[in-house]
Amino acid sequence: MNIIVCLKQVPDTETQIKIAGDNQSIVTDDIKWVMNPYDEFGVEEALRLKEKHGGEVTVIGLGPKRVTESIRTALAMGADKGILISDDALEGSDSLAHAKALAAAIKELEYDLIFTGQRGVDDDLGIVGAAIAEFLGIPQLSLIVKVEVSEDGHSVKVERPIEGETLVITSPLPALITAQKGLNEPRYASLPGIMKAKKKPLAEKSLGDLGLDSSAFGLDARKLKILELTPPPARAAGKIIEGETPQEKAAQLAKLLHEEAKVL
């Protein structure tokens, strides 16, 4: 079974995000970049399926050279080879353009399953997985928390939670699955895995290598444009409820909730 995992590099969730002077981007100085957490679930599930059914796991990342670090992390976890799509023309591209480039790279490979994270924790759009499936003309199974591939390798059964229930879906392969929390617990890369990752193949491809026109990428080609980024409003200071007895404090709290917070 040949499995592909698409990963994105995002700011660490503990990083303090600052809006740049153009009010349309963020300051990238001193940001710690990591593999998107939802993509980690995809890598782990691909490795588990490989261990059960055999085959090969290929990890594809898109972006500047630093994305290589996240690809190497996936290789250290156990993936077999990596591909980095890197091109200056990609700078400022939107999610649809990213999906188009990833789909073009995938078309050159043999695959049975594709994993992506259900969304990136940076922009929270959740577009890329669905768009890749559309470009490739294959089924997309989203927000999945359990994956079972049939013994003959021709179909997959997945589970998706919906409003307190579980939706069970079967699909022929190839298919694309977007992974979410609950699917598994990603493993840590071992020291031997980290050493082996340095020798595993990692190819770099440009848009031209994929047969794509660079004019369809970048800021000017965006279908989804960012008009302005604004920070969330500052949180108001809390209040301490005064009173001699619990009853007095409860009455004062109820009054504030009614008159100031307007929730009662």
Image: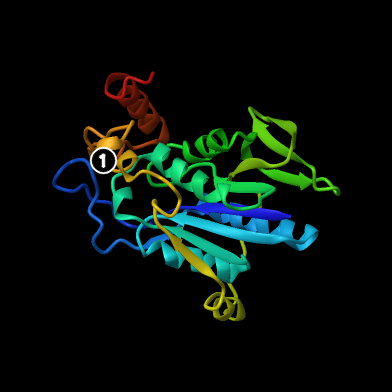
Instruction: Identify the residue under disc 1.
Output: 219
Query: Total label count?
Result: 1
**Residue 6 image point, x, y percent:** 53, 51
Quadrant of the rendered structure where residue 237 is? top left
Residue 244 in sight: yes
Residue drawn 39% across and 30% down? 250
- Screen quadrant of the N terminus: bottom right
Horizontally, residue 96 falls left or right of residue 116, namely: left
Q: How is the image coloured?
A: rainbow
Q: Is residue 158 left or right of residue 215?
A: right
Does residue 182 show up?
no
Instruction: Work out whether 242 lies above or below 31.
Output: above
**Could you tell me residue 28's position as x and y percent?**
26, 57
In the figure, is residue 251 to the left or right of 5? left
Q: Name which residue lies at 44% across and 63% down.
A: 204
Q: Residue furthest left?
A: 21
Please tell me how crowded label 1 is: few (under 14), some (14-19), or many (20+) other residues with Cα within 10 Å.
some
What percent of the width, then of the height, locates residue 54? 77, 61
Local secondary structure at mark 1: helix
In the rendered structure, which amino acid carries the disc numbered 1?
A: Leu
Q: Residue at x 39, y 56 (%)?
A: 206
Q: Which of these two is toward me, 60 or 164?
A: 60
Report x, y in % for residue 160: 67, 35
In the image shown, does 63 or 47 lie closer to the viewer?
63
